[in-house]
Image (tube, rainbow, N blue to C red):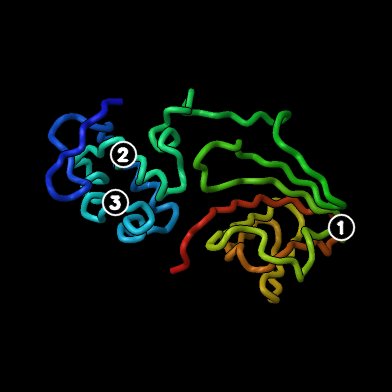
């Protein structure tokens, strides 16, 4: 990583022509911003970096200083190292079947399929519900952060989703997407175990 000195000209985000943080960071910032459901203006407000400057960085028209990159990282709820991927030794992480995190609560067994990587905005888990089991109570508070969205895919058996007081019946092969910051739970009222995948994307803004 090359460090660039900030210009003393008007505009806190203006940089000199010397090389700065690699311009390839632009597409990564855009992808992270989109994943969080943020507009350029939203990220500008969160980071203190102007929207025009952010746009130039994302289009790889300019390289941000380290100080500006740190502000952008903070606006994306990341450390500078996470944004620049300085703390990642590899670009591929394999989660082996026998070494995943597993939990069991009553008749509900689930395992995390995604490893706990920095800056990760989505998690995938595999769930098994015994007959008559459920994933919590209908009066439980929201389980995930505001703006989260969840998709469940039924792999085997039948599944009922109760979200914000509404009930939805699902069968093997069906999928459902819903706002996961609302009170919700899953139930298995069948006679066979139910298996389903759940994908939770955090911090998405409702449109």
Marks 2/1: CA–CA distance = 55 Å
- In the rendered image, is residue 193 in sight? no
Query: For the residues marked 3 and 2, what is the alpha-carbon distance in whole angstroms?
Result: 10 Å
Q: Nearer the viewer, residue 96 or 45?
A: 45
> Mark 3 or 2 closer to N-term?
3
Q: Are marks 3 and 1 in contact (CB under 8 Å)?
A: no
- Report x, y in % for residue 62: 19, 40
Q: Which residue is mark 3?
A: 49
Query: Which numbered dot is residue 97?
Result: none
3 and 2 marks in contact (CB < 8 Å):
no
Q: Nearer the viewer, mark 2 or mark 1?
A: 2
Q: Nearer the viewer, residue 94 or 154?
A: 94
- Give the left or right position of residue 67, taking residue 196 as reference: left
In the displayed structure, would residue 64 be above or below residue 143?
A: above
Quarter holding the C terminus is bottom left
In the orientation shown, which residue stands out farthest toward the top? 89
Residue 22 appears at what percent x and percent y? 27, 31
Q: Is residue 146 left or right of residue 28?
A: right
Q: Is residue 15 above or below residue 201?
A: above
Callout count: 3
Q: Which residue is mark 2?
A: 67
Q: What residue is disc 1 on?
A: 131
Q: Residue at x 31, y 42 (%)?
A: 27
Q: Earlier in the sequence, mark 2 or mark 1?
A: 2
Cα–Cα span, label 3 and label 1: 53 Å
């Amino acid at each position: 990583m090359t460090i660039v000195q900030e210009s003393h000209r008007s505009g806190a985000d203006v940089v000199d022509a010397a090389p700065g943080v690699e311009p390839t960071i632009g597409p990564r910032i855009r992808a992270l911003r989109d994943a969080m459901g943020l507009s350029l203006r939203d990220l500008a407000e969160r980071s203190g970096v102007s929207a025009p400057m952010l746009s130039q960085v994302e289009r790889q028209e300019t390289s941000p200083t380290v100080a500006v990159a740190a502000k952008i990282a903070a606006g994306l709820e990341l450390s500078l190292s996470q944004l620049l991927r300085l703390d990642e030794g590899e670009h591929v992480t394999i989660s082996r079947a026998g070494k995943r995190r597993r939990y069991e609560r009553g008749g509900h067994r689930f395992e995390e399929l995604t490893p706990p990587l920095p800056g990760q905005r989505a998690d995938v888990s595999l769930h098994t519900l015994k007959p008559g089991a459920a994933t919590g109570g209908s009066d439980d508070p929201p389980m995930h952060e505001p703006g989260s969205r969840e998709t469940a895919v039924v792999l085997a058996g039948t599944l009922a989703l109760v979200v914000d007081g509404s009930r939805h019946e699902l069968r093997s092969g069906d999928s459902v997407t819903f706002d996961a910051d609302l009170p919700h739970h899953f139930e298995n009222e069948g006679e066979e175990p139910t298996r389903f995948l759940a994908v939770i994307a955090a911090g998405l803004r409702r449109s």
